[in-house]
Image (cartoon, rainbow, N blue to C red):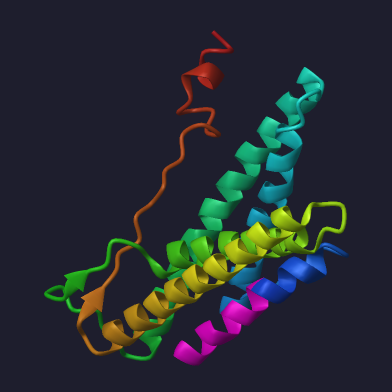
Amino acid sequence: MEELFVKLDEIQSRCVEDWHTEEQTDFSDDLFGLVKEQHLQNFRLWHKEDLARIPDADDSIIAGVKRDIDTLNQKRNDQIEKIDEYILSWLSSNKIPMKESSELNSETPGSMLDRCSIMALRIYHMREEADRSSATEDHRNKAKAKVETLVAQRNDLFNCLFNLIRNIKEGKRQFKIYRQFKMYNDPTMNPQLYNKNT
């Protein structure tokens, strides 16, 4: 399983670059496909968030972007849970039980991969700033230093993920899927939506 996560590190970084040319639209139903599909939601969110911050954007554009962000966030969280479900299924099929007596990890593998996904996007765009010819030399140098820090942070996070999987296999740690139960998109849970028809 650790070998798979090493590939996921490379996949996230490569996808950010590829999708700036053309987004992927179909995904396999294995761990790679699930991680790519989750990563795509973050990729789209990143660029929607950029649009939301245009100072002179029309209110109607901002409203549309906000709705898109809500939808993408819902998909992103759904995919995190699917990744965790896949990993739990993989552990079970490989007869690797998580001991109830072992320490509980506060974050799931899916949540950690989500953070790595966001950091892959941040690194890509910070590198753009480091290479931007229209920026000052000082700006580019600061951006380069930030890239180095971000890469180190992302590597640390992947190492934490590798250690979690290793510790689970050794019976030292466990994780649980904590359902998000997002309410804002649910017409039966959000009072602004269900009161609209009364």
Please provide the residue range marked out in magenta: 1-12
State yes or no: residue 10 in magenta: yes
Query: Compared to 82, does 94 lie above or below?
Result: below
State yes or no: residue 77 in magenta: no
Residue 120 visible in the current orientation: no
Q: Main secondary structure of the magenta part?
A: helix
Query: Compared to 128, does 55 lie above or below?
Result: above
Query: Compared to 17, does 177 lie above or below?
Result: above
Q: Say which quarter of the image contains residue 185.
A: top right
Residue for point 82% across, 62% down: 20
Residue 171 visible in the current orientation: yes
Residue for point 71% across, 33% down: 52
Residue for point 45% across, 89% down: 2
In the image: residue 57, left or right of residue 76: right
Q: Say which quarter of the image contains residue 181.
A: top left
Q: Position of residue 53 (x, y in %)?
A: 71, 33
Q: Say which quarter of the image contains residue 104.
A: bottom left
